[in-house]
Image (cartoon, rainbow, N blue to C red):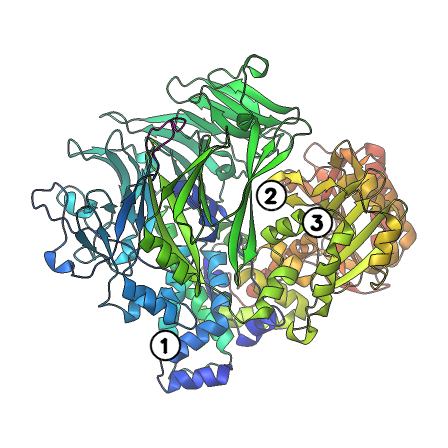
Amino acid sequence: MEDVAIIDLFFRRTENAISEMLIRYERLFVSLAKNILNNEQDIEECVNDAMLDIWNSIPPHKPRSLAAYGCSVVRNRALDKYRYLCAQKRVPDACSALISELDECIGHNDVEEQIDKIELCHSINLFLDSLDKLNRIIFVKRYFFVMSIKEIAEETKLSENAVSVRLSRMRDKLRCCLEERGAFS
Amino acid sequence: MNSNDIFSAISYIDDEYINEALQKNTRFKPVLRWIGIAACFVFSVASISLFWSLQNNGGMVETSQDPSSSFSSPPTSATTSHSGNLTQQTPQSGIPNWYKPGSLTVRTLTYKKNMIKFLADTSVPKPRVLPLDTSNNMPHFMNSSSNSEISLPSTANFSQCYDANLLLIDPSSQVPGHEKCSGLFYNTETREIICLSSLLKNQIDHNFHINVLGFNRRLNRCSFTTGQKAYCYDFGSKKLIKLPQCVADTETKAGMIINVSDDGRYIMALDVTDDSKPAALKIVDIDSDNIQAQHIYDYENEYYEPYKRLSFSPQGYFLVYATPPADEYSYVGTASGVWRMRDLNTGTEWQGKGIIIRFISNEKAVVVKTNDGARVYNTTNGVDITDSINLKAWEKSEVVTKVSGNKKSGYKTKISLTSLLPGGKTEVVKQAVDAYYISGEYLYTYTTGDAHIECLSLDTGRSFKVSVDSNYVEQTSNLQKECLIYHYIYRSDDGTRILMRFSTGEKIKEDDVAEYKENYIDLGNEKLDELFDSMSCLADMEDFVKDGLNFPSDKLDGRAPHFEFFSGDGYSALIMFKGFYNSDYCFWFVEDYRDKTFSFYIKYSMTNYALGNYYKHSDRPYRKKLSSSADSAKTKAVFDFLPTSNDNVDLGKYYVNSKFDSIKLWGDILKSDRLLNAINNSYVYDYENKSQDGSVMGYDFYDTEKLKEIIDIVLKKPTKAWVSLEGERETKGCKKQYQISMLAGPYNTDYEISIFKLANGKGMAFIDSQYRTLDNKEYQRLLDIYKELCNDAKGQYGQYIVG
C-alpha cells in the first residue's frame, strides 16, 4: 500500500494503518532501531512504542514522507531507550563511539549558553544543504541511521577509508558551520 | 551544548535528507556492537540465539497452589481454566549405559490450542501483536502427571533458563499479580513463581528494577543488581548478602561489562570508561557469606575490545582473559591470539596462544588450535602435554555448524566435526537439524515434526532417542506452515533433564523477490557459507549464475547482480557484483589449476582484496580442493555467455605458505600504474602552513610525476614493514604534515597518502590505510616534494579550506 493510502487510513482511524505501515516499513524501522539498541527485546519495544506515537500523532500531523517521519519517530524512541539503558549503566555504550565522533563538532571554548534545539536543527539542515549529495547521504546514513562505516562503504561503493575521511572532513565543516552560526562562544 | 544535543537534533533533519539516504536502498544489516555481544555473554542461551525472533510469543507464569510455599504467589484470580501442556518424556527404550549422566527426561512447553489456530489463520503471521487481541485467551501449560493447570499471559517472554528448569521471565511480561515486579522466575518443576520483588520487598528499595545476573543451583543462590547496589540472595537460608560495589552501578563508571560463569558462581565485572575503553577487571565469587571482589587486571588507556576476550570455562574453574598486546592486535579467537588463563581457586595464571577448542578431563586440560595444529595444555600451569595424553578423535576435532535456508523455507543447521590434525578431515554429523545443544561429547538435536530428541555421542557415533510430547510436535508442525519455528533446547547441568520450548518468526510467503534478494543481493555471511560449501569448481556455479541473471531485473530496483568472467594463465575467475554494476566491491570465485584449489575472495576496492573467511570461524578461509573435473577450457566454455572482465589480478600468486598476502598485493597494485591511470582528481593538503584563522588549505594538482615519485618512495620498503593501526593509535603522538587525496576509479574511491611527524621526530607515511616509519632520507625527500607540490599548485588551480 502506498504512503498516501496508509496516511489516509490513519486519518480515518483505521487500525489497519499500523499493520500496513509495518508491512511496508517494519524492516527499515527494525534495522534503524537495531543500529542503536541491538537488543531484540528493546528493539521490539522501541518499534511498538514508535507505532503508538505515530498513531497518536497522525492526525493532526500529516507527514510529507511516511518513511522519513517514521524513521524520525523510531530514532527518537530508540535514543530514549538507549539513554535509559545508559543511565542504568547495565550495558556498554552502543553509540558512545559515534557520539564521541560528534564531539569534534564542538568548539573547545566554554559554552556560554545553550542554543535552542530548533536553531541547532536549523543549522544542521543548512549544513546538510551545503554538502554535495554523496557526502550528505554518507552523513545521514552515519548519524541519522547510525550505520557502520563498513555498511556505508558498501552501500556507497566507496572504500571504508574514503568514508572515514569524508566523515572527518564533514565533522570539521559542521564544527565551522556551528561556530559561524554562534553555536559556541 | 554537547555532542548528545547534536545527535538528538539530527533526529529532526528535513525529511528530504532522510529520503535521499533511503533512495534505492533501504537495506540495513544488523551490526554486532559491544552491547549485543556483551549481552550475549550475560544472557548466553544454549540454543540458536542467532535466529531469535523479534516476536514475543508465549511465556508462563506460576500459580502456586501451596500457601505455605516460601515463594510468592500471584492472586488466585490470575489462574484460569484453560489448559495447555508441560509434559515430560523419558526414553522409550531406556538409557544406554554409555550415557554417563544415567538418565534423560525431556519436557516441552506448548501453547493452548486456540492460540495456535489464531496464529495459523493469520495471513501474515505477526505473533508480536497478538497480545493486543488476545487478552482473554491466555495460553496455558499443564503438567500431564499432576494435571495441574498453569496460566500464562501471552505477553510473557523469557530471557534466560537456568539448569533446564528455572526460567527467568522478562520483566516487561506483565505477569498477572506481578505487573510491577522484577526478578521473576518460573520453576517448571514445581510450577511456582519465584518473585524477588515480593520476597525482598522489605529489604531492598522497591523503586528499582531487579536485574538478575545469574543463578547457582548448588548454592541455591541468585545474584542481582538493583539501583546502585548488588546482592546475592540465598534461597535456602533466605539471607540477602551484599555484593561488592564493583558489580553494581555507580555514579563514577561510564558503564561496565558483566559476565557470569555458566553455573552462576562467578561474576566478572569490567569497568568501561567514558570513551569505551576498558579499565579494571574484577571477579566476585558468590560461594561465601562474606563476598569480596578479587582484582584481576588494570587496563591502561588503550582502545581495546575486551568483550571479545573474556570467558569462563564451562564448569567455571577458569577465567580466560587477554591483555592488550604490545605491538600488534592479535585477537583472541585467532590462532595467533594471546590470552591468560587464571585458575579461579588458586589465582595462578599462565599465558597461552591460539583458539580454545574445548576443556577436557574435567577441565584439567584444554585443547587449543594453534598455528602448529592442535595442542593440549595442563590448565593449571600451561605445560604442553600434547605428547603425553591420548585424546579421543572427537576431542581433537572442532564442531563446525553451518546454517542454510531462507525466510521462505526456514533454516537448517548442518553440524560437522573437523579434525584439528594436519590434513584433518571433516565428517558431517547431522545434515539438517532445527535445533541443537552440545555439552562435552553429547550432541542433542531436534527437527520440527520429529517425535523425539536425539542424543548422539560424538565419541562413538552411537545415539538414542527420547520422545517428545505429541502436542509439541503437532503444534510446531502446524505452525511451521505459516511461521518460522525456532526451538530452544536447555540441558540441566547434570545432563539428566532437557527443557524445550519454541517461538515463531515471520515467514516469507509468495514474495519471490525477497528470496532472490536474500540469495543474490543481500547475500549475508551465512548465505556465503552455504554457497561456497555447495561448490567445488566454477562450473558448479553455472546454475547459480544463470538463475541470478534470469530474474526480472525490473523487480530489483536497479540492483540486479552482474557477473563477469576472466580466463588467466593457470586460473579462471568468476566475478560477481551483487547489485552494483562495476562497483569496486565485488566477489571473486577463483579456480586455480596450478595448485588445484578453489577460492573465494572479496574485493573491497581497487587496492584491497581479501581471501574470504567462514563467518563463524574467522580463521578458516574460503579455500578448498578444486574438483578434479575442472579444467580451464571447459570452464571457459561454460561461461562463454558472460562478459570478459578487465580486472585480471592473479590472486593465487599471493597465496603463499598457506596465507594470502593481501598487503603484498596491495603494494603491487599501488606500485603499478593502475591507480595512477584511474585517478580522476587529486588534491594536496598543507597541514604545516595553516592560514591565519587556523584553517588547513587544500589545492588541486595535476603533477603525476611528483605523485609517482611519492608513491615510489613510500612503497620502497617491503610490504611487511607496513602496519594497519587501529582506533586512536593512528593519532597518538602523530602530527599530520601533508596529505594527498586521490579520487580514482568509476566511483571516485578516495586514496590517501600522508606523512606524519612522530613524537620522536621521525617521519611516518600513510597510504590507503597502512602505515610505516620512514628513514630520514625518505622523510626529507617526501617533505620536499609535498612542499613543492603545494607551492606549485598555489594560485594555479582551485584551492579549498579543508578544516
Image vertical order of residue B623 relative to residue A102, above or below = above
Q: Residue at x 29, y 69 (%)?
A: B132
Asked whether B57 falls inside the magenta stretch, the response is no
In terms of secondary structure, what is the magenta stretch mainly? loop
Q: Residue at x 59, y 51 (%)?
A: B526
Asked whether B102 falls inside the magenta stretch, the response is yes
Label annotation for residue B535: 3
Q: Residue furthest front?
A: B93
Q: Residue furthest left?
A: B68
Residue type (three-letter) at the residue carrying disc 1 = Trp
Which of discs 2 and 3 lies nearer the camera? The answer is: 3
Q: Mark 2 vs mark 1: same chain? A: no
Give percent across and percent down for residue B493: 34, 33
Which of discs 1 and 3 lies nearer the camera? The answer is: 3
Identify the mark nearer the N-term, 2 or 3: 3
Q: Are marks 1 and 3 in contact (CB under 8 Å)?
A: no
Instruction: Please give the residue where the numbered disc 1 appears in the rendered image.
Output: A55
Residue A140 is left or right of residue B474, and the answer is right
Label annotation for residue B727: 2
Give percent across and percent down for residue A71: 48, 69
Image vertical order of residue B709 relative to residue B746, above or below = above
The magenta stretch is B94-103
